[in-house]
Amino acid sequence: MAFGWIDDQAEQRRRAGLVRTLRPRPADSPLLDLASNDYLGLARHPEVAEGAAEAARTWGGGSTGSRLVTGTTELHTELERELAGFCGFEAALVFSSGYAANLAAVTVLGPHGSLIVSDALNHASLIDGCRLARGTTQVVGHADPDAVRKALGTHEGPAVAVSDTVFSVDGDAAPLAAVAEACREHGAGLLVDDAHGLGVLGDGGRGAPYAAGLSGADDVVVTATLSKSLGSQGGVVLGPARVIDHLVNAARTFIFDTGLAPAAAGAALAALRLLRLEPGRAARAREVAAELHARLTAAGLEAVRPDAAVVSVRAPSPEQAVQWAADCRTAGLTVGCFRPPSVPDGISRLRLTARADLSGAEIERAVRVIGETRP
Ligand code: PMP
C-alpha cells in the first residue's frame, strides 16, 4: 500500500507516548492560559478585533492575489511603513507568516557561493531557510560569537550570520551586539529573527535589535512575526531599502504566495498603534516573566532565567512532561510542552509564556498548579 509506511511511524509514536493531537480551543475557555504567544494580551483586545473586522469589511476576506498583482492594499503599505518606523528600520515587507518571512530572508541573503552561519538552536523556519538557500550553511555552537567569527574567517565572498534574538524553547537571548561585532569584522551581514523579542524587548517593545543598538544599520536585517505580541497573523522583514527591494524581486515566498489577509494586516496595525500608546505593556510582560521565574524557583522547580517573556521549566522525561502538562490542564491551566523531536537536545520542558495581562493572583495560581502537579 502506497502510504503503509506511515502506519509504522504512527505505531512507533504511539509506543513512545509522543502522539500529537489537535484540540480546538473554546472561545470562552475557563483555562488560565500560559501557553499562547499572545505576550501582550492583544489578540482579543477590542481594538485589534475591530481592526481586523474593519479591514475585512473594506477589503474583503482575502487579499485576492500575490502582493505583486492584486494582493497589496493601502493597509499593507501602511503597516509596512509603521512597522519600519516603530522598529527603527528604513523599510519593511510583510508576508503571510513569520515562517514565510524567514524562508525569504535566508534564501535571498544566502545566495549561491555565500556562507550562512547558523546558530545550532535556531527556529525551524530559519533552519528550513538554510536548507532551501543556495549558499553553504555552517551550523555553529549556540549563542557563541567566537564560533561565528571563526566560521566567517574561513570564507571569501558574501556571508551572513543567522540567529534567533530570543530562542523559542528556553527563552534565552542571543548575544546580539557581540555577534554583530563578529560579523562586522568580516564584512558579513547579520540576519536575526525577533519573533519573541518584538513587543517585549527594547524601549516600548521595539525589539531586541533596537535594544542592542542595531536598528537601522545597513548590515542588519530583522524578521519577526505578527502572530505573537501583535496578536494577529503574518510575518515581516525589516532592513535597508536595498534589501527589501531585493526581496520584492527575488523572494519566492513573497512572489508566489498570496498576500497577507487584510484582516490580519488590520489587526496588526491596530495592535502596533496600541503598543505605541501603551508602551508599558512590554515592560509588564518582562516583569511577569521575572515574577514567574522567581516563584517557580522558590517552589524548588528548575526554571531557566528568562531574557524575554518565555519561561522554560525542566521536566524529567518526555512522558512525564506530557503527563505534567495534562495534569496542569485538568487543574485549569494550559502550558506548552516541548519534547523530542521538537527539542534537539533531548531535554523535555514545560514552556510558559508570561502575558502582560496576567494578574498577580493568576501568576500565583499558575505556580501553585505547576508545583502541585510536578512529577
Ligand atoms: N520564528 C520563531 C522564532 C518562532 O517561534 C516562530 C513561530 N513559532 C516563527 C518564526 C514562525 O512565525 P509564524 O508563526 O508567524 O509563521
Image: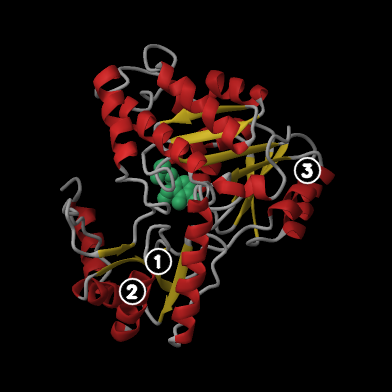
Q: Secondary structure at mark 3?
A: loop
- Say above or below: 293 vs 213: below
Out of 302 and 159, give the one closest to the viewer. 302
Q: Are marks 2 and 3 in contact (CB under 8 Å)?
A: no
Q: Residue at x 76, y 45 (%)?
A: 183
Give coordinates of residue 252: x percent, y percent.
47, 26
Instruction: State which tag comes first along the sequence, 1 or 2.
Output: 1
Residue matched to label 2? 366
Three-letter amino acid code at the position of disc 2: Ala
Give coordinates of residue 13: x percent, y percent.
26, 66
From the image, state whether disc 3 or disc 1 is nearer to you: 1
Three-letter amino acid code at the position of disc 3: His
Q: Are marks 1 and 2 in contact (CB under 8 Å)?
A: yes
Q: How is the image coloured?
A: secondary structure
Residue matched to label 3? 155
Residue matched to label 1? 352
Q: Quadrant of the C terminus?
A: bottom left
| Mark 1 to mark 2 CA distance (whole Å) | 10 Å
- Judge: label 2 CB < 8 Å from ligand 1: no
Instruction: State which tag comes first along the sequence, 3 or 1.
Output: 3
Q: Secondary structure at mark 2?
A: helix
Q: Residue at x 63, y 62 (%)?
A: 142
Three-letter amino acid code at the position of disc 1: Leu
Q: Residue at x 56, y 28 (%)?
A: 92
Out of 295 and 17, give the one closest to the viewer. 295
Q: Residue at x 78, y 43 (%)?
A: 155
| Mark 3 to mark 1 CA distance (whole Å) | 40 Å
Left or right of 139? Residue 32 is left
